[in-house]
Image (cartoon, grey):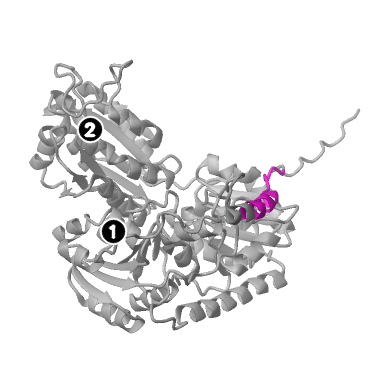
């Protein structure tokens, strides 16, 4: 291809983004769904003008910069990381408002592209409005704060720099092992500067997402360890879903009899009623999953980064000889817990393991225990969600009504507060992708904008956002964007009058819920109505059932408010390491510290050697 075209940096960038495609397993799609943005003097005349001239590349104006990045992340997660949005904001506070959501995307390995405006590259206006003046460095701007939370960062101070930088940005965004936030900081004068662009840069480009397999030696070692294990356990993380490996996991579990537990990101890897499904594991796990985890002598982690909730702060896997085999496309995660790394795509690796273990099955009594735990926990869930508390329902009852009322082809979205722990244990997942929790960063305010992204990714699915009053009040504004774009959501707004999760934690640490309870009453229904939503207050479980039916038949975003009794929780079945004051005048804190000092003795470093001994070389002689 030859030729060139004279365009501004902003125009060339939007043309480039619109031409990027991704392909996996022979299916090709545009990588960018469009651009979300809020304009200011730092991006209006550059990227903003370019978007105006390219109407085929969808632009959605947002209400909050942090929220629009959450929306992009929700969309990308629901799209199995095969598609995302770009997000543009102005220089200064508009850009730094994106920092929190940028960190969330990187921590969760979700691709989002940020295009923050920046100060003048020429410095002919210095300082420009909203410019940070660093006393010892002239080339620093507030956008440098994006460096530690970005997987790729660049500041484009000359037009020609965009060519290699944009290609690097797409390389990172489409790489399952490296993906996260990518930031291209765009000085406002450079955005409007023209350059002659090679046609090859603007042409359609396809990025292929391949399915690498681990090396045969590592696969052989893993198969040997699995065959030797008496009590093997698989733990499914988000990588199972992102690699579309749920059917491969089912086949593996059914062929080998190995039970499967799920992290927050991996929930839904198996249907809740599958006999191999133990459900939630870790600090927010079920009794059965945690019991078997404590006894497991071999743990197969599949697509998990082994966060502290999944390991109950490294107290969960208590067998003295436990070893780990980690299937992960990212080598850094594969080596965690001194595990044997199977660095590769989850689906391809599970298929290879199933083949390598042909004819082998776990001990029948171990498999039967998993099935018994599955049945027992289902009965306990039914008891918790139909307990009939009054006069206010428990949060568990609300979850049960919503779970039953939104249909099989639905998605629940949540991120923070007391809901993640209850949802992880109680939500009955029926289809992959039906459980959407952001728990790597557990970012309050994620829920509503991410729900919009989930719905945009698959309009056929009913999307129900469950959010507590504390998280709702941090970021309700993106509900306006849902109404503006005609995105139908069901928001179940749970009012427990404060920060229920941290309040409960505070009480367990001897601090009595200090600073976590609401001191004023907010009319949440009126608040949601003021944003334009259809609002249905529900005071009882029956009210909630009726409201869900009405919301499902509505054609726009509906908010259902329901007050719950915060004193009725779902029991925890594992420990989480939150250090307690070593010295305190409060007797409750002193008692909690004593219990904490005992609990930390159960933490294990997991430093066992990851590999089998190599065979001795055959003797040689004359």
Query: Label 1: how many residues lie within 10 Å, few (<14), some (14-19) or many (20+)?
Result: many
Q: Where is residue 550 in the image (x, y as percent from the top left)?
A: 23, 79
Q: How many labels does the image show?
A: 2
Q: Position of residue 412 (x, y in %)?
A: 36, 65
Prevalent SS, magenta region: helix
Residue that badge 1 annotates: 448
Is residue 22 depicted above or below 570 in this figure?
Answer: above
Q: Nearer the viewer, residue 473 or 258?
A: 473
Quadrant where the C terminus is found in the figure: top right
Determine whether, in the image, residue 218 is placed left or right of residue 551. Answer: right
Determine whether, in the image, residue 177 is placed left or right of residue 560. Answer: right
The answer, for residue 236, to whether it is visible in the render is yes
Label 1 or label 2, whichever lies nearer to me, is 2
Q: Is mark 1 on a helix, strand or loop?
A: helix
Q: Is residue 325 magenta?
A: no
Is residue 126 depicted above or below 100 in this figure?
Answer: above
Residue 209's image quarter? top left
Identify the disc placed on residue 92.
Answer: 2
Which one is earlier in the sequence, the residue at label 1 or at label 2? Answer: 2
Q: What element carries label 2?
A: loop
Determine whether, in the image, residue 419 is placed left or right of residue 292. Answer: left
Quadrant where the N terminus is found in the figure: top left
Q: Which residue is drawn at 68% across and 60% down?
A: 294
Q: Does the magenta stretch include residue 594?
A: yes
Label 1 to label 2, Cα distance in Å?
Answer: 25 Å
Residue 359's image quarter? bottom right
Q: Give the range drawn in magenta.
A: 592-608
Q: Nearer the viewer, residue 384 or 497?
A: 497
Is residue 258 depicted above or below 300 in this figure?
Answer: below
Q: Position of residue 102 (x, y in %)?
A: 34, 42
């Amino acid at each position: 291809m030859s030729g060139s075209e004279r365009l501004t940096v902003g125009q060339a960038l939007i043309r480039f983004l619109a031409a990027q495609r991704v392909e996996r397993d022979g299916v090709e799609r545009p990588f960018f769904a469009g651009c979300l943005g809020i304009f200011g003097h730092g991006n209006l005349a550059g990227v903003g003008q370019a978007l105006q001239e390219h109407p085929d590349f969808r632009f959605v104006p947002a209400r909050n910069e942090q929220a629009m990045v959450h929306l992009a992340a929700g969309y990308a997660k629901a799209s199995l990381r095969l598609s995302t949005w770009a997000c543009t904001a102005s220089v200064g506070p508009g850009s730094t408002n994106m920092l929190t959501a940028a960190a969330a995307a990187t921590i969760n390995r979700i691709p989002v592209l940020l295009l923050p405006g920046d100060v003048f590259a020429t410095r002919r206006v210095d300082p420009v409005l909203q410019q940070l003046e660093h006393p010892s460095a002239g080339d620093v701007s507030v956008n440098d704060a994006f460096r530690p939370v970005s997987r790729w960062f660049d500041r484009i101070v000359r037009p020609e720099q965009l060519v290699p930088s944009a290609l690097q940005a797409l390389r990172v965004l489409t790489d399952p092992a490296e993906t996260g936030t990518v930031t291209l900081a765009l000085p406002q004068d450079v955005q409007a500067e023209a350059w002659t662009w090679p046609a090859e840069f603007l042409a359609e480009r396809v990025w292929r997402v391949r399915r690498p397999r681990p090396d045969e030696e590592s696969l052989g070692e893993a198969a040997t360890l699995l065959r030797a294990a008496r009590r093997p356990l698989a733990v499914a993380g988000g990588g199972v879903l992102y690699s579309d490996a749920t059917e491969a996991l089912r086949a593996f579990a059914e062929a080998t009899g190995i039970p499967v537990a799920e992290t927050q990101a991996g929930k839904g890897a198996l249907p809740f009623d599958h006999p191999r499904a133990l459900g939630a594991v870790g600090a927010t796990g079920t009794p059965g999953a945690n019991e078997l985890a404590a006894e497991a002598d071999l743990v197969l982690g599949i697509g998990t980064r082994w966060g502290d909730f999944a390991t109950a702060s490294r107290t969960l896997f208590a067998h003295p000889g436990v070893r780990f085999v980690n299937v992960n496309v990212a080598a850094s995660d594969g080596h965690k817990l001194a595990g044997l790394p199977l660095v590769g795509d989850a689906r391809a690796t599970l298929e290879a393991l199933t083949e390598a273990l042909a004819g082998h099955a776990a001990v029948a009594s171990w498999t039967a225990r998993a099935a018994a735990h599955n049945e027992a926990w289902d009965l306990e869930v039914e008891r918790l969600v139909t307990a009939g508390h009054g006069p206010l329902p428990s949060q568990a009852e609300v979850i049960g009504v919503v779970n039953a009322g939104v249909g099989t082809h639905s998605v629940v979205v949540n991120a923070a507060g007391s809901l993640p722990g209850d949802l992880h244990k109680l939500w009955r997942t029926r289809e992959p992708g039906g459980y959407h929790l952001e728990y790597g960063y557990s970012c309050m305010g994620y829920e509503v904008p991410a729900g919009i992204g989930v719905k945009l990714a698959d309009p056929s699915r009913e999307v129900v956002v469950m959010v507590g009053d504390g998280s709702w009040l941090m970021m309700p504004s993106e509900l306006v964007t849902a109404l503006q774009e005609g995105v139908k959501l069901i928001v179940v707004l749970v009012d427990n009058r404060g920060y229920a999760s941290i309040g409960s934690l505070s009480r367990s640490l001897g601090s009595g819920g200090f600073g976590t309870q609401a001191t004023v009453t907010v009319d949440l229904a009126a608040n949601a109505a003021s944003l334009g939503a259809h609002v249905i207050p529900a005071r009882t479980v029956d009210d909630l059932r009726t409201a869900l039916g009405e919301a499902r038949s509505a054609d726009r975003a509906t908010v259902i408010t329901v007050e719950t009794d915060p004193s009725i929780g779902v029991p925890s079945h594992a420990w989480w390491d939150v250090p307690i004051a070593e010295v305190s005048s409060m007797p409750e804190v002193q008692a909690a510290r004593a219990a904490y000092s005992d609990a930390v003795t159960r933490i294990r470093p997991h430093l066992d050697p990851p590999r089998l001994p190599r065979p001795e070389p055959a003797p040689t002689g004359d």
